[in-house]
Every structure is written in C-alpha cells, then in structure tokens.
Amino acid sequence: MSDTYFTHTQDQLKQLARDVLGYAKAQGGTDCAVEISEGSGLSVSVRKSQIETIEQNKDKGMGVTVFIGQRRGNASTSDFSPAALKATVEAAYNIARFTADDDCAGLADADQMEMAPRDLQLFYPWEIATAEAVALAQRAEAAAFAVDPRVTNSEGAGVHVQQSHFVAANSRGFIGGYPFSRHTLSVAPIAGKGAKMQRDDWYSSVRDAAKMSSPEQIGRYAAERALARLNARSIDTRNCPVLFEAPLAAGLLGAFVQATSGGALYRKSSFLLDSLGKQVLPAHVQIYEDPHVIGGVGSAPFDEEGVRTVQRDVVKDGVVQGYFLSTYSARKLGMKTTGNAGGSHNLSLTSSLTQPADDFAGMLRKMGTGLLVTELMGQGTNYVTGDYSRGAAGYWVENGVIQYPVEEITIAGNMKDMLAQIVAVGNDVLVRGTKQTGSILIENMVVAGS
C-alpha cells in the first residue's frame, strides 16, 4: 500500500541502495553504508481565521559513507540518476582518502545487524486536501476564541502532514527500510490586553491522524491554559519543592538521555560520567526503553546503522543499567552499541510509588506548598557540571491548591541532585516525542524571584 504514495517503491529504493554499494566497491572502498529517502508533506497555518501560509514539500535524498580501512568520507545528493550516484560515491571516496585513520571508525559487526526487521506499523498516510487542513486549523483557533472573551488574539494554528519512506543498507549484508508518518495539529491563543497579555499553546502529534485529539479539544485546552496565566506575579526568592508538569518532565528525561549518551561520555562532557551500575535516581524510579511499540512515535526495528533495537531497562530501581551508544561511541568507551545511533526509542519514566490517586490534582496535594512549573525559557543546563538554571513560569501552590500564576522567576539547582530528589511521578502520563512520563515532583530547588 505504501508504494502508491511515493515516486519510488521500496524495491526501487533497495535497488538504488545496492547500486550505490556496488559503486563504492568498484571505486575501491573497503566498506560502505547508504541511506536513500523520499517524502512529501503539507503544512498550513492560519491566524485569526485568515490563511497565513500553505506549504507543500516533496523531497528525496541519498547519503553515503565510504570507508577505506578506518578512514571515512561522507557525501550526499538529491539526484538519483546513475551518473549522480556514482559521482557522489566518488566524492565520498576521495574525502576518505585524505582523512586520518580513526581506530573506532567502521560499520557495526554483521551479527549486530537486524536482518529480519519487524513491521511496527508506523505508516498512516493522511489524505487531506489543503482546504480541509485549513478548516481544521480554523476550527482549533475558533474553539480557543470561543472559550472566553478575554482570549483576544492568537499566534495562530497549524496543521502539518508528513509521510516518508527510506531504505538503509551497508556492505555487511544489511538492507532494510519502511514508510512512516507524523501529523500534528497545534494552536497558540493569547489572553488579555496590553502589557498583561499571556499566551499558551497545545498540540497533538501522532502517526495516525485518526488518533489525533479533535481541533475543539486542542483549542479549548490551549485557551484555558492561557487564561489561567492572567494576572501573574513574581514571588520572593526561596527554596521549595518544584512540580514539573508532564510536558516539561519529559525534558528532564531528555536531560538524562543526553548525559548518558555516548558522545557526551567519551568526550567527558557529562555530569553522569561512569554512572553505569550506580544509583543515580531514587530506588522507586524506573526508566524503560521499548523500540517495538506498535505505531509508536519513537519505534524502530533498527537504528540508523542497521543495528537491531532491543527492549531494555535503562534504569532499574534507580541504578543505571545502560547508556545510549552508537557503534562509534561504544568503541570509544570500550563497550558494545546499544542500538541507539540516532537517539532513544520510546522511553518511559515510572515510579513504583505512583498510586491511582496521583493524577495532576493528586500531585499538587502531594507537593503541598511549592511551585508548579508549566513553562521554561532558555537553555540553562551545563551538561559538564550538571548546573541548571532556567527562566520559568507557572503557579504558586499552597496546601495542594493553586493560588495564583507566577512569572519572571528562575529555577535553579544541579541536575544530579534533581534526579536524585525525585519524590514522586504522577499518573498524568503524556507522550512527548520519544519520551513518556507523568508530572515529576522534585524535593527542593532554588526559586529566584523579586
């Protein structure tokens, strides 16, 4: 079915990949890896019901890495003609000729390759006309305006539709590929007037449009979030518990991934150096990776190098069980690849202490008095030291009840301490990209205000 949506079929892409491998061998390369992809998409945006942009994309590309021993060169092209493919291989070969030897360069071992990839059902094409996409965005924005007269403006609403497919292959016998899709509907309303305006947003991003939240749900919730931020104030500097709303809690999980990724580890630019087998999070916290979730946004049967992906405990009872390694970074560390070339796959952070009552309201009650954070600004994480300082906005909470919105504050701490001080994880679970978690309660942080 997928072949009807693209100019080339999967079989045609596979043949092109085999051709490239043949060109590399004829050129004199000792090893070669190639990826060939093709995709198309539609993006529309509206603001105050008027169309702002309509964009359609149709793209294709081939990237090749040629090895001469342990020297490598890369090149790419968007031209699939035999002459262009040969010229691109030759360019990669010539780059490799003048590159220094690298002990860790090279393809993964053949026994690590996924030779029989599973179909994880990642392709759900959305046959939507431009006018229909515009109408969906307009409905989301209209729903936001309809919530309250104090919703006075909008940064717009948008629909993004994308469907692509690819084939990857290498000279160790691996060849595989599949089609995939990703569709998004978003809206960003503004509440209030003049200097007291507040904005917020919400979106739904899925592989299968049938599972997308309705435009009305997205618009209403985005408006409610913006309205709740009206009449925000600053607070005095203090130390207190901090509850990260689920969308932001996924960012904490992302920080852990970055700190335990091979590139940061072998460069010694991580606050979690040598953390394998050590207690980094509380004993009640687990992090699990499942690349094989059917239809999952972060699902993949193999990584960018063709290495098979595996289900695994990344953190068990707070103890780090594994890093996120590609073949190159694994060799740098004297380890084996974990099938994470290109990143993590469907990570979930959970707590054995989480109870049915620990929904969002339950997490506020559990915090008692402290700061609920719903927005972060800036890139204030030093991954070498773990020092963390971000501009923030949210709500001050007393006795488990939100009292008033807060803005113009900074929250600060150290990531190592923050991970160790996770008191609770909510069951208000949200998926954001490849990561899934509920809200996360940190025992104590510095909140700098007026």
Image (tube, grey):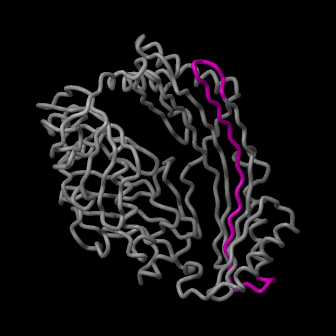
Front residue of 367/207: it is: 367
Tell me what residue is drawn at x 72 percent, y 53 percent. Answer: 38
Tell me what residue is drawn at x 45 percent, y 78 percent. Answer: 330
Residue 377, located in which quarter of the rendered image?
top left
| Outermost residue, top side | 149
Tell me what residue is drawn at x 46 percent, y 19 percent. Answer: 144
450 relative position to 184: left or right: left
| Outermost residue, right side | 83
Q: Is residue 342 above or below residue 262?
A: above
100 relative position to 415: left or right: right
Tell me what residue is drawn at x 24 percent, y 40 percent. Answer: 449
Number of numbered discs visible in the structure rendering:
0
Q: Is residue 153 magenta?
A: no
- In the rendered image, residue 248, in percent from the top left (x then y), is placed at 35, 44
Q: Is residue 119 above or below residue 385?
A: above
Q: Is residue 33 magenta?
A: yes
- In the rendered image, residue 188, in percent from the top left (x then y), is placed at 48, 28
- In the rendered image, residue 65, in percent from the top left (x then y), is placed at 68, 74
Residue 396, located in which quarter of the rendered image?
top left
Q: Magenta span covers which residues?
A: 25-52
Front residue of 45/362: it is: 45
- In the rendered image, residue 14, in percent from the top left (x then y), is placed at 74, 64
Residue 156, located in which quarter of the rendered image?
top right
123 relative position to 329: left or right: right
**Image quadrant in which the N terminus is located:** top right
Q: Main secondary structure of the magenta part?
A: strand
**Image quadrant in which the C terminus is located:** top left
